[in-house]
């Protein structure tokens, strides 16, 4: 028997379907993590007798995507090698499983036009596209032509980038080359794409020839030199990101010599990219590095453009087929939430739309039918308000014009490709907000988002976003939740965004399970602290990655497990009725080195605009820790030590916190960061000072239930009076006409609340009406 280690993190244990799964789309992909080289065997059977399997294949890679859907029923599957088998797993297909059949890559290429263009548009589409774009995308058309005219005045050649200094020896020297190289090469090749697209729209050969000259210049770079993937992957990706589009759209204007040089450049870069993702660990099985999530898409589009000229292109696409059409997304699942946060999610999901839109346009195969896509727009609607001053959970939270426009563009693409019309107001609000925001110079890309510019027309509608009629929406797959009182009115909205993720503290995520962001009346009152001053920089690694920088508990200054897939969390037991909304975040595994239990229970009281938060802590045997409650803001905190309260005011919005702990305790107030971010970006002015509050009970108890009431107010929500007390060994608070009792550890309930005369009990199972309440 082949032994496998089971693990809750899907990157550590990528076996799929998991045992007992009911699959959402049909057919499922099959994947596993072997500790030996192939070939492998895969068998699928409707019962657990594998003598006559429905699927019995021998394959070189540990991933397989059937071409045909399975009938409804329960299945068993196993994988093995030439001599042994792993355990059999079961899964079910039911009538609700969406059929999305993906034919072979050979079929893709047979459906693809033999002429150029073939990415997003074909020659047969051009006349209709030119007519439609002048009506549906007039503003984008004007921007595209204006940018193309500006690009004609610039040099159409770029010198090969410099080699990078060693980042481990001198990070500042490394940054001084890497940062301008990344943005400079990206802008140059994106400029080629913009010129080529302007040529498609206008048939003006000046634009097309300028695009050709740019790509001919890049074709002189050595793919194994300073822009080699293994040395500077950002420079390499700049070439394969928008470059294939530019070549496709301006194909007929290359000279024979230019075209041959371009083909050779992409042949070599394609081989390097494939070897990097397939031969140096298998993407989606043994490696999930963030940049490879871009490279799989870039390689697919490269292969489509150059497949007649690059003999390996078909085999690249065959390998990419189950990766892109089955295993993707690596940082999400079907409910649409993205583990790395909205900023990195914007980048990586937008990149995936390049492939999904290309495949749909070229072959008719529609990946947008999968539930992830509509749900991703829905997730963004609830966790990322247009007014947000801080988006949070993950790297890059600054509010820039391009960030807001990019979010609008992504949701617009999804809306058009899926027919989800309910997001037009959200899209418009982001674009309107972006008009008043700073444009970061190096991030300003020429042209337009091509997959949106060429997307289908979408009619407006008054459809309502699913979940808009409730306060709490939970996205369990990546561990996100949002309390939103009025998503479409910033002045009235109270929004708490919460994270406790099964994807852990890796990549662009931090050690911040059970973290929250709080917006009140359009103002961010509480946010994770620190800035993205460069991946792995001193500030990033020693402040941002650590739990102390987040609105989480720390244990005697100790963080959750950092940079670890074992640092997992989850959001459980959501509940809502007319009076309250509730969730629980479980982060036991994140504190496993010094705690057996670390959970955050949150109740929102709808009438009073207050949150009741209970942090439940049980120490690991033999380890003593003090439970520390942390919160961060752009504005100073005002503290009342005697009454154990704090207050924060920002432009008419108020947050007041009342701790129920009646023991000896103390507040710690600090500002700034240790270490601070190094000043080296044009965006440094956006890095405003931040203030930090920590509340610490003095006695190191083996277990503790720490309660706090967060009262909010804005222009139309008055501040509710809160006062704390004690009743024997029970800590209490009155919240206007409501009340809460926090019980000591060891009781059969954590808390009891009376809200508008109705009694609720909070325990291990969540929250429920007390017996006799209705």
Image (tube, grey):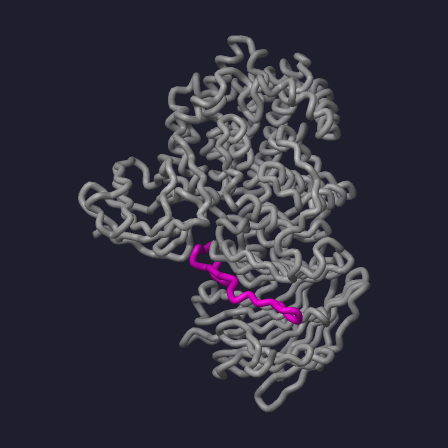
Quarter holding the C terminus?
A: bottom right
Q: Residue at x 47, y 38 (%)?
A: 292
| 573 falls in the magenta region | yes
Q: Can residue 301 be seen by looking at this rendering?
A: yes
Q: Which one is in front, 538 or 125?
A: 125
Quadrant in the rendering for residue 525: bottom right
Residue 440, horizontal then vertical, whole percent: 70, 39
Residue 442, horizontal then vertical, whole percent: 67, 35
- Specify whether 272 is left or right of 661: left
Q: Can residue 217 be seen by looking at this rendering?
A: no
Q: Residue at x 77, y 71 (%)?
A: 719
- Specify whether 342 is left or right of 654: left
- Specify whether 293 is left or right of 312: right
Q: Residue at x 54, y 42 (%)?
A: 170
Number of numbered discs visible in the structure rendering: 0
Quadrant in the rendering for residue 282: top left
The answer to whether 594 is drawn above or below residue 66 in the figure is: below
Q: Which one is in front, 297 or 561?
A: 297
Magenta-drawn stretch, dominant element (helix, strand or loop)? loop
Residue situated furthest top in the rendering:
256
| 147 falls in the magenta region | no
The answer to whether 460 is drawn above or below residue 475 in the figure is: above
Residue situated furthest bottom in the rendering:
728
The answer to whether 448 is drawn above or below residue 259 in the figure is: below
Residue 325, horizontal then vertical, whole percent: 44, 38
- Specify whether 96 is left or right of 773: left
Residue 420, horizontal then vertical, whole percent: 62, 43
Stretch of the chain drawn in magenta = 559-581
């Amino acid at each position: 028997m082949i032994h496998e280690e089971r693990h809750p993190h899907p990157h550590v244990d990528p076996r799929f379907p998991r045992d007992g799964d009911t699959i959402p789309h049909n057919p499922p992909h099959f994947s596993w993590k072997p500790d030996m080289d192939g070939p492998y065997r895969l068998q699928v059977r409707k019962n657990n007798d594998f003598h006559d399997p429905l699927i019995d294949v021998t394959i070189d890679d540990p991933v397989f995507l059937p071409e045909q859907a399975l009938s409804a029923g329960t299945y068993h599957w196993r994988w093995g090698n030439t001599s042994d088998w792993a355990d059999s797993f079961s899964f079910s297909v039911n009538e609700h499983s969406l059929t999305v059949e993906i034919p072979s890559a050979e079929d893709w290429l047979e459906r693809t036009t033999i002429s150029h263009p073939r990415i997003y548009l074909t020659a047969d589409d051009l006349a209709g596209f030119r007519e439609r774009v002048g009506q549906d995308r007039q503003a984008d058309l004007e921007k595209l032509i204006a940018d193309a005219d500006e690009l004609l005045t610039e040099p159409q050649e770029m010198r090969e980038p410099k080699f990078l200094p060693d980042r481990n020896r001198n990070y500042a020297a490394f940054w001084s080359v890497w940062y301008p190289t990344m943005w400079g090469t990206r802008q140059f090749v994106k400029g080629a794409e913009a010129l080529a697209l302007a040529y498609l729209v206008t048939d003006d050969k000046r634009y097309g020839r300028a695009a050709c000259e740019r790509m001919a210049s890049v074709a002189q770079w050595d793919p194994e030199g300073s822009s080699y993937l293994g040395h500077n992957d950002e420079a390499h990706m700049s070439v394969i990101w928008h470059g294939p589009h530019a070549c496709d759209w301006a194909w007929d204007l290359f000279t024979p010599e230019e075209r041959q040089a371009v083909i050779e450049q992409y042949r070599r870069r394609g081989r390097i990219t494939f070897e990097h993702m397939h031969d140096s660990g298998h993407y989606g099985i043994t490696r999930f590095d963030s940049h490879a999530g871009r490279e799989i898409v870039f390689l697919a589009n490269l292969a489509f453009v150059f497949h007649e000229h690059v003999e390996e292109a078909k085999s690249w696409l065959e390998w990419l087929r189950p990766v892109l059409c089955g295993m993707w997304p690596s940082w999400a699942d079907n409910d649409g939430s993205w583990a790395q946060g909205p900023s990195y999610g914007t980048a990586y999901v937008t990149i995936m739309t390049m492939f999904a839109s290309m495949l749909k346009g070229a072959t008719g195969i529609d990946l947008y039918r999968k539930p992830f896509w509509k749900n991703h727009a829905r997730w963004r609607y609830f966790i990322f308000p247009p007014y947000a001053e801080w988006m949070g959970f993950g790297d890059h939270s600054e509010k820039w014009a391009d960030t807001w426009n990019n979010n609008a563009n992504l949701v617009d693409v999804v809306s058009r490709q899926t027919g989800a019309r309910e997001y037009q107001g959200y899209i418009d609000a982001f674009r309107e907000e972006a008009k008043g925001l700073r444009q970061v110079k190096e991030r300003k890309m020429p042209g337009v988002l091509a997959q949106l510019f060429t997307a289908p027309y979408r009619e407006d509608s008054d459809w309502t976003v699913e979940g808009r009629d409730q306060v709490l929406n939970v996205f369990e797959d990546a561990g996100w939740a949002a309390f939103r009182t009025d998503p479409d009115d910033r002045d009235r909205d109270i929004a708490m965004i919460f994270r406790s993720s099964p994807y852990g503290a890796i990549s662009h995520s931090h050690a911040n399970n059970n973290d929250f962001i709080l917006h009140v009346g359009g103002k961010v009152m509480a946010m994770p602290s620190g800035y993205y001053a460069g991946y792995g920089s001193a500030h990033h690694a020693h402040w941002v990655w650590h739990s102390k920088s987040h609105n989480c508990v720390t244990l005697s200054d100790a963080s959750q497990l950092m940079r670890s897939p074992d640092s997992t969390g989850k959001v459980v037991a959501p509940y809502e009725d007319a009076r309250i909304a509730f969730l629980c975040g479980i982060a036991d595994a994140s504190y496993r080195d010094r705690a057996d239990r670390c959970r955050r229970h949150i109740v929102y009281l709808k009438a009073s605009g207050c949150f009741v938060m209970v942090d439940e802590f049980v120490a690991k045997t033999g380890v003593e820790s003090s439970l520390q409650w942390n919160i961060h803001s752009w504005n100073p905190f005002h503290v009342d030590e005697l009454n154990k309260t704090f207050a924060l005011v920002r432009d008419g919005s108020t947050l007041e916190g009342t701790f129920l702990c009646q023991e000896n305790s103390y507040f710690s107030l600090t500002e700034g960061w240790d270490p601070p971010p190094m000043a080296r970006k044009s965006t440094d002015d956006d890095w405003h000072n931040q203030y930090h509050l920590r509340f610490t009970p003095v006695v190191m108890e083996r277990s503790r239930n720490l309660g706090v009431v967060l009262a909010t107010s804005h222009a139309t929500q008055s501040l509710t009076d809160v006062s704390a007390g004690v009743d024997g060994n029970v800590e209490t608070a009155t919240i206007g006409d409501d009340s809460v009792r926090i019980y000591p550890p060891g009781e059969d309930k954590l808390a009891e609340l009376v809200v508008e005369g109705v009694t609720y009990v909070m325990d291990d199972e969540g929250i429920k009406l007390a017996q006799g309440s209705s």
